[in-house]
Amino acid sequence: MTYSNDLDLTRKALDTYIENCLKRKNPVVKQPPMAALADDLAIEDLIKSGGLHGECLTDFLDTYLDNLHQIQHPASMGHQVASPHLSGALGGFIDAVTNNPMAIYEMGPAAATIEYALINWMLKKVGWTPAPYPGEKGQNSNFGAGVLTHGGSLAQLTAFAAARSHADPGIWANGNNPALVVIAPPEAHYSASRALGILGMGQKSLIPAPCDEQGSIIPGQLDETIIAAKKNGKKIMAVVANAGCTAAGLYDDLTKIGALCQSHKVWLHVDGAHGASALLSAKYKHLLNGIEQASSIIWDAHKMMRTPGLCAAVLVKNHEHIDHAFTQEASYLFHDKEQAGFDAISRSVECTKAGIGLKFFMGLAAEGEQGLAAYVDSRYDLAKQAANHITNHQNFELAVQPEANIVCFRVKGLDDKQHLELRKSLLASGKSYITSTNFMGKRWLRFTIMNPATTMGDIEHTLELLLEISTKQ
């Protein structure tokens, strides 16, 4: 059978790929010209003639896997993307084969149930009340809710839609209220301002939150910003806080910000896309003290919970807020019916939604909570080790002591442009992969330690390579 043979060939190719990554055999990244790569992959010929089976499939996979960013390579320390748990990858494969669009319960009961359970698990980690299963009796209506989305940007958009509907219940029918504003730190992820653009509110509706030189919100001054906005006739749709910020992984003071928002009766939205996974850790969950005061949270499983992309959660403390975010009519979807489960479509931008919870669940179920907690601890701990090494090295400068698994640093004596050139040369070598960011008015090189196989040796080797390259520039 062709399918069975092709499956076996693919498994063998992936086994070799993973083994080569972990043994550091191949470059972390290669970037051949796209036109040449298209020819090497024989894309046009295969589209025209077919035949991607057997030996042809093997040749294609060899070329394809050789020209990927080797995300499982221990020296891949760039972006905030998981080195995925292979059990989670199996979940993605199973979901692709079964293809259940589970936003409608009858179209994917098992997938929908897993997502519902995962959302409840996350709600409990935040400190909120989980939702009862449909049909359960004896439950009050004061519970949280959420939905899994294909990425943090979509989760951000969904959370803002919920906050907007709460601030102005008539907005779905009447259109945007020009008085609505969002207060967010300049270090907020770009998806926050993008969501406001998509919602038709415009960039003028974004008020910068007062922050210190590291980009963290100053609670006392935030109080003044809220009061000033109200005096100017603005209606605050939400205050956005970071847990932790994209550039350096720093956490805002959620205890003080949460208390302040509650005193003003303002919606607090916490962007925990990267840093909310510290809730799993007994050692680091204090960084999220006060998060239970939020009205909404986003939390990416495809970052620090080792889930293949994309899989993010948007969570709300009060289920009614997300249930009223969208008001739609579609007779083939929205109608009275008897069923044993829950239709997530009422909470989601997406209609045909994949069962992304399965890949999240299978990785989590393989390791268990304690296994993922140990992973988070190890990556945060390693970042602190790296920061200490950089601090004590005469040739490097540390931006700030890391709170998460992100470390920003510079080579002493180099300017911003030279740092970009340095990174470019490092990537061209194929020996390591890091990113760069603007932070506190400077361009910094940046480790994001996601891979469970990354060691202090990989970090030290990368620093040595950077010094070696810098002397030749």
Image (cartoon, grey):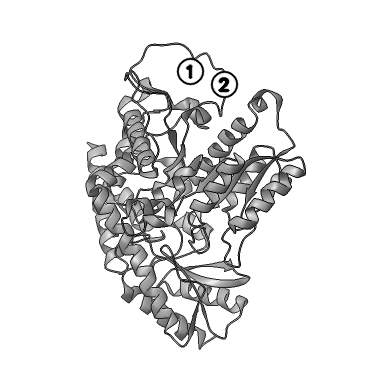
Q: Farthest residue in the right direction?
A: 232
Where is residue 186 drawn, in percent x and y? Answer: 63, 57
Q: What amino acid type is highlighted by mark number 2?
A: Gln
Residue 22, image quadrant: bottom left
Q: Which of 463 and 113 is in front in this view?
A: 113
Quote the CA–CA distance across marks 1 and 2: 10 Å
Where is residue 214 drawn, in percent x and y? Answer: 57, 66
Left or right for 1, reference 294 = left
Left or right for 297, reference 73 = right
> How packed is label 2: few (under 14 Cα within 10 Å), some, or many (20 or more)?
few
Q: Are marks 1 and 2 in contact (CB under 8 Å)?
A: yes
Name the residue tied to disc 2.
Answer: 328
Circle count: 2
| Quadrant location of the N terminus in the rendered image | top left
Where is residue 205 drawn, in percent x and y? Answer: 71, 44
Q: Give the residue drawn at x 51%, y 87%.
A: 472
Q: Nearer the viewer, residue 434 or 324?
A: 324
Helix, strand or loop at mark 2:
loop
Name the residue tied to disc 1.
Answer: 333
Q: Can residue 215 be seen in this view?
A: yes
Q: Give the residue drawn at x 57%, y 21%.
A: 328
Where is residue 9 drawn, in percent x and y? Answer: 25, 48
| Quadrant location of the C terminus in the rendered image | bottom right
Q: Give the residue drawn at x 57%, y 73%.
A: 420
Q: Can residue 64 be seen in this view?
A: no
Callout in the foreground (1, 2) = 2
